[in-house]
Amino acid sequence: MNCDEINVWLDTLLEEINEIKVTRKSDRRVRVDVDASSLPALLELLKGKASYVHLSAISCVDWPDDEEFELVYHCWSYEAKSLLSAHTRIPRNSSEEFARYVSVYDIYKPAGFFERDIYEMFGIYFESSPFMEKFILTEWNGPPPMRKDFDAEAYVNETFNWAEYNPDWLQEITEEGGGIAIRPEDVRL
Amino acid sequence: MSKLGNIPVQAKSEKKRTNPLARVFDELIQFCQSRSMFMLHYCTGCGAIELPPAMTSRFDMERLGIQPMVTPRQADILLVTGYVSVKTLKRVILTYEQMQSPKYVIGICSCTVNGGMYWQSYATAKVLNEYLPVDVYIAGCMPRPEAVIMGLRRLMSNIENGKGNAWKDYYERYDYYLGNQQHLFGDDWQTPVDVIGEAKFYDLEGEETYGEHTRTLEQHQEPLEAAVMRVKL
């Protein structure tokens, strides 16, 4: 069976699942929008039956206006030579400490790594994921920093000081012919 | 007799220097020191890419007497090349405190001066000289090897003229540096190096060596224990 045949076969299969919207972007790209409750079943099917064995990433998008997080599971098939991205939306749970979703670690092992990262950056707790402790931001105690309602600039202004623009030692350098090449008032924006 | 950790050390004698040739020797020592520099490059950011050409045959730092060194305990210069995240800053401080005096810090790239292009980032420390005493900043994004060498030459001339004394400032105003470190890392921050003990040893205790932050350190300090060596049979 060549890869075009697999793609045709996959399209027919996906059309039979309920609450699913399949958009074929090109020969090698498929976008699937799926309800949050049926996403694990879809991934199980993709891995077991349709040769999508490689979960290359889980990305997360914050939609604060819709009060939702969008999770995108990028799955590759080496036989069909195509990328399938499964999109799903989960409630943002702004009133609580974190949003919740189910882990797909039992289907794809690398998911544990991505889920731990998303938990740290967006505050989505994945039930039954094996590693949920701190990962990269070991020194961080604030809110999840990649959420759009986290104001990084306000945090920075509150936490850090800025260097003086005209310190004394710079005047010595200016006298020697160095110093600031373009002053702020000369900058064209 | 004072104490450095648990080891008793002989303090410097109080008597004034009377030898008229002492200054001559000082100058000679400074001259020699400025021409024998071992550099530890802590490559945190993109500025590190300009160092290989500066060190190797194209620009050849070695003709100035500056060589890369692999361990902090044998190095004189700590070269921080690029942005320092809060997590990295802890490691930079640990590295710096392990170095032997006299020691010098050079901050390369705009990021060490004022956050650079990461000025908005929640995870990067902005002004390096709030946490460590920086001798020379080399601004630029990134500075070319010529600029790096110019900065190193400036450090050399500072040492030769007896102006490269930022490392003394770390002991004299330890409370200020420790306060900024505690602001980022929390009150229970401590390093394995007894900086106050070293300040006593070098006779560099100033009025600002002690303060509220060193008192906080004393409250949270846990005694360090030697690592136990075990042989598996």
Image (cartoon, helix red, strand yellow):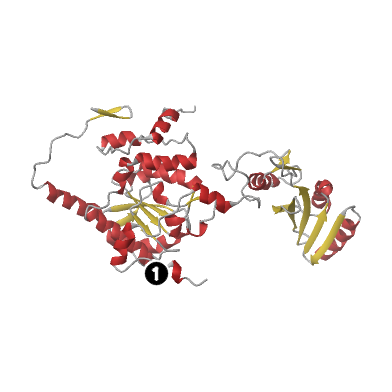
Residue A178 left/right relative to A155: left
Disc 1 residue type? Ala
Q: Which residue shows up at 13% across the image and 35% down it?
A: B15
Q: Position of residue B25 (x, y in %)?
A: 14, 49
Front residue of A39 and A11: A39
Q: Is residue A1 visible?
A: no
Q: Which residue shows up at 32% across the image and 37% down it?
A: B209
Q: Quadrant of residue B229?
A: top left
Front residue of B89 and A78: B89
Tally the numbered discs.
1
Task: Report which residue position mark 1 lands on.
Answer: A181
- Parent chain of label 1: A
Q: Secondary structure at mark 1?
A: loop
- Mark 1, Cα crowd under 10 Å, few <14 / some 14-19 / many 20+, is few
Residue B228 left/right relative to B61: right
Q: Position of residue B194 (x, y in %)?
A: 36, 34
- Residue farthest to the right, as pictured: A16
Q: Position of residue B230 (x, y in %)?
A: 46, 27
Q: Position of residue A80 (x, y in %)?
A: 79, 61
Which quadrant of the figure contains the N terminus of chain B?
A: top left
Residue A139 left/right relative to B197: right
Q: Is residue B163 visible?
A: yes
- Residue farthest to the front, as pictured: A185
Front residue of A55 and B86: B86
Q: Up-down: is A168 above or below B75? A: below
Q: Which residue shows up at 26% across the image and 39% down it?
A: B204
Q: Up-down: is B78 above or below B97? A: below
